[in-house]
Image: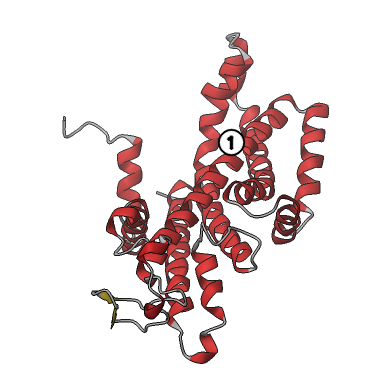
Amino acid sequence: MNADQPDSPARRLWHAYTESRTAVVSLVLLSMLVALALLAPWVSPQNPYDLLQLDILDAKLPPGEAAAAGGRFLLGSDEQGRDMLSGILHGLRISLLVGVVSSGAALGLGLLLGLVAAYFRGWVDGLVMRVVDLQLSFPAILLALILLAIFGQGLDKVIIALVAIQWALYARTVRSLALVERDKEYMEAARVLGLSRTRQVLNHLLPNCLPPLIVVATVQLAHAISLEATLSFFGLGLPITEPSLGLLIANGFNHLMSGRYWISFYPGLALLITIVSINLVADRLREILNPRQVK
């Protein structure tokens, strides 16, 4: 490559991101957590939800204690004799799955409705935004509790509930961004050239709305994971057969006063590190994607 050739936008973005040591550490840590979650079935010392691998004699063992069948529980065991490290890796896998799927689905729905509202304006815009205002008038956790009380427990039910409480924020954000871009010269040129509405929106309007939306989506990912953990902690999220980090924290909550801190502490620590890492990555993205930032 010619040394005088300018860097690509992706390369410039990466160079800007790596100027922050905290952001780099957060990204590396988040990548490690995602890798461990994906590889959980293969790297976990135990399948914590296979009853044949559990022994009641191993119940509530402290960190570092030897197991009855050999080996050690590095982070201790819970009241059913499950290895806490294995439980955390499998729980992290489900928490990330719920967060990514629900945020992605909500982003897609909000993106579609926000672009439609901004482009067509008029009664379409009014209808979409009145629905958005109605949805955002309810506290997110309250709406999720109501929906799960109606739907019941289950992985799919939690994802539907999280999509229902997130899409409106995406729709409002996309509409605000698209309204600014809609009347700019490049959109006027696209209309003069006779491009179809679909091409105007997908090829011109959408790309210019994406950078700020990436930041919102990253923040909402952390929000979705924390909301799912809260719902599971209250017993309205995932069932015991599909435990996330929130459910693992809830399982050990009653044992805190008896000194068995590790049953709740380590899943809570894993949840904290995950959410903080995502938020720090989002903070750095907001800094480098801010169009008003002086380079």
Left/right placement of residue 133 relative to residue 88 reads right
Q: Give neighbour class at mark 1: few <14, some 14-19, many 20+ (Cα, 10 Å).
A: some
User: Outermost residue, top direction?
Assistant: 194
User: Toward the viewer: 73 or 265?
Assistant: 73
Task: Tell me the residue that label 1 is attached to.
Answer: 108
Q: How many marks are shown on the rendered structure?
A: 1
- The quadrant where residue 52 appears: bottom left
User: Outermost residue, left direction?
Assistant: 2
Q: Residue at x 52, y 84 (%)?
A: 255
User: Toward the viewer: 7 or 59?
Assistant: 59
Secondary structure state at the residue bearing disc 1: helix
Q: Position of residue 170 (x, y in %)?
A: 63, 43
- The quadrant where residue 45 appears: bottom left
Q: Position of residue 243 (x, y in %)?
A: 51, 61
Q: Residue at x 64, y 28 (%)?
A: 182
- Image vertical order of residue 85 relative to residue 244, above or below: below
Q: Amino acid at mark 1?
A: Gly
The coloring applied to the image is secondary structure
Q: Residue at x 54, y 62 (%)?
A: 240
- Image vertical order of residue 236 relative to residue 125, above or below: below
Left/right placement of residue 28 relative to residue 288 reads left
Quadrant, the N terminus: top left
- The quadrant where residue 116 appears: top right
Q: Residue at x 68, y 50 (%)?
A: 165
Whether residue 189 is visible: no
